[in-house]
Amino acid sequence: MKTPQPRWIRIAQLGDVDPITYGGYFVYRDRTNAYAPEAEVLIEPADDEQKEGWTLYRFILDRCTYIDGVLSDNPHHPDHAVWFADYLTTIAVSAGRTRDEMIADFTDADPIRRAHAYQDIGHAFGWHEFDQYPRIYSKRSDLPRRIRRYRDDSRRQQSRGQVQPETTAAPTP
């Protein structure tokens, strides 16, 4: 029996419109549906003086369960809480959300909603908690092509003449 290999497609870019310069957050789905959705977080160079040096974290967007008051990422042991469960209220408040909203996002079937919830956890604890062995790229040309070639859709459509840039009309007297 042949093991199906994933065919990833990007379904969302939740970070900056210029991810190479300012960092990015990408959400992927496997077209074969054999693998769970994943996310990548691109951390830009540490300061404006340093033009090179990116860190790329990749992790699975696990769908959690919430049974009898326990948020779990373990489908075989839903009574074991996810590692960040004790801090969920604090993280939710710091993100301007409620604990219940975060629980709803972690348990939702939509990977983009889960990605938003994981983003709040990543900002609180650091992305290394999801990927202890991130890829380090010293040069822009070394970045994966899927990231180097990223362009904001509105810019692409604008350059093709499909979308007109917004203009502000002068106020009428």
Image: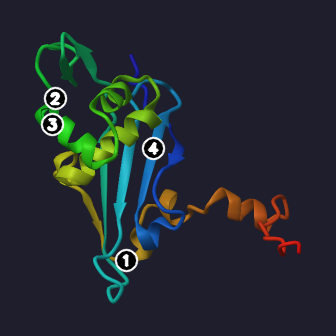
Q: Which residue is mark 1?
A: 139
**SS for dot 3:** loop
Residue assigned mark 3? 84
Q: Nearer the viewer, mark 1 or mark 4?
A: 4
Residue 6 appears in the figure: no
Residue at (52, 44) in percent of width and height: 10
Q: Are marks 4 and 2 in contact (CB under 8 Å)?
A: no
User: Which dot marks residue 13?
Assistant: none
- In the picture, the quarter occupied by the C terminus is bottom right
* Residue at 34 percent of width and 23 percent of height: 107
Under circle 1, the secondary element is: loop
* Residue in view at x 26 percent, y 53 percent: 123
Which of marks 4 and 1 precedes in the sequence?
4
Task: Specify whether 87 is left or right of 21.
Answer: left
**Residue at which label 2 appears:** 82
The residue under label 4 is 27
Furthest toward the bottom, the residue is: 49
